[in-house]
Image (cartoon, grey):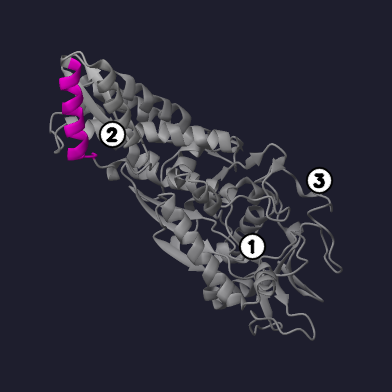
Amino acid sequence: MIKFYNTLTRKKESFKPLKKKEVGLYTCGPTVYWFAHIGNLRTYIFEDILKRVLEYNGYKVKHVMNITDVGHLTSDADTGEDKMEKGAKRERKTAWEIAQFYTDVFKKDIKKLNIKEPLIWVKATEYIKEQIEFIKILEKKGFTYKINDGIYFDSSKIKDYGKLSGKKTKKIKAGARIKIVEGKKNPTDFALWKFAPPGVKRQMEWDSPWEKGFPGWHTECVVMSAKHLGIPFDIHTGGIDLIPIHHTNEIAQSEAAFEKDLARFWLHGEFVVLREGKMSKSKENITILKDLVEKGINPIAYRYLCLTTHYRSKLTFSFPALESAQNALDNIYQKIKELKNNSVTRFPRSWKTCYSENYRKKFLEYINDDLCTPKALALMWKIIKDERLKTQDKKYLLLDFDKVFGLSLDKIKKQEVPEVIKELAKEREKLRKNGAWKESDEIRKKIKEMGWQIEDTEIGPKIRPTSNKQ
């Protein structure tokens, strides 16, 4: 039985998909005006773990992710510049060039993090016609009104508006994030279609039944998820910052247009925080994946670090913590190399002993309990240290668990000892037998300088690499 914490109900619930053995999953993707920082990427890692857990349980996942390449304004109050237009000015490129460049960067980043791509990518600019038709449905049903700068959604007509965040409409007041645009009826009303400013030629604008302009940010996900997954679908995910406005507004539009819930389960990942506060693009205190790579960090080490904290808990980021994660990952890689050196290459039919199967049951219990990766990761280390486990059982348990962890353990190859190291080891062994300890120690140092080390055992010397990097 899989249980997820549903933001909509604020409790853990048993999960069963609408269709037998198939799950409809929609994940809010990036706004491609700049780099995704590691806080953003943590959300995509959590969503990848979710997808892998579903697949591990035998479900086929129809995964849709959007690319926001228009309509996301710099203010949640439907004011300010479109982020794509702002990015174009910053880099002196077209908005279309900006969108393509940062989409490509994002796809490279998730590949480095071993995040599986969605089955379907959808771009907001490729669904303008569908968004216009959707707004016309809302207009026909009486949920819209027109003011000087666009067509707005009347949130007061949704009785349970704000239910995702647990706030009632009357308690939501204008403030730092929600301000009253002149002509807006309610603080929580939002733009469905923004008019192009008079005398200004935008790079991204389209004709509409109202005026030339562009869609608001909150409409694209409703339109694209409904088209590819139907309504309702099983799971909608994103970061917790999307709860109070973006996802709340998606739900409102779905109820207004279709009189149905958009999704049955809503899952949200927590922030990555720095000692001085939340990572934010607006504050320009972001760290991107490229920064980690330039410091010699394997991107998978950041993935490992994310696994050590539950997705609904804040992750405090620091480079010492990341380096510890790198060391832990290196040790796992080294153990996999040793197991591959000493175990059979084919999967034995009878490897699931009662003892090893107990480990697998416990692993399933942890990951099916709202993706509890910290406990599942601790179980992995218990397996590594368990001397009672047969070598082949240990190897295949680790590889089996990695179907969820995604640490690329299946790509680790055993490292062949170079002939020159073997010859030096033989020479050292002769010197040891003859009592030439000083000379044998010199050879040992030389071997270590070449990236290898010798461990003396009862059955003879064991050679392994000193560097555990993948």
Name the side, left or right, on which 208 lies relative to 305.
right
Mark 3 is surrounded, within 10 Å at the Cα level, by few (under 14), some (14 to 19) or many (20 or more) other residues, namely few
Foreground: disc 3 or disc 1? 1
Name the amino acid, label 3: Lys
Foreground residue among 303 and 48: 303
Residue at mark 3 to residue at mark 2: CA–CA distance:
55 Å
The image quadrant where one finds the C terminus is top left
Residue located at (29% from left, 32% from top): 447
Identify the residue position indicated by label 3 in the image.
Answer: 171
N-terminal of the pair, mark 1 or mark 2, is 1
Q: Position of residue 14 (x, y in %)?
A: 46, 35
Report x, y in % for residue 306. 51, 39
Looking at the image, can residue 20 be seen? no
Q: Position of residue 364 (x, y in %)?
A: 36, 31
For discs 3 and 2, the disc positioned in front in the rendered view = 2
Q: For the point 85% across and 61% down, which residue is it?
A: 180
Start-end of magenta stretch: 414-432
Mark 1–mark 2 distance (CA, rounded to whole Å): 46 Å
Q: Is residue 405 left or right of residue 90?
A: left
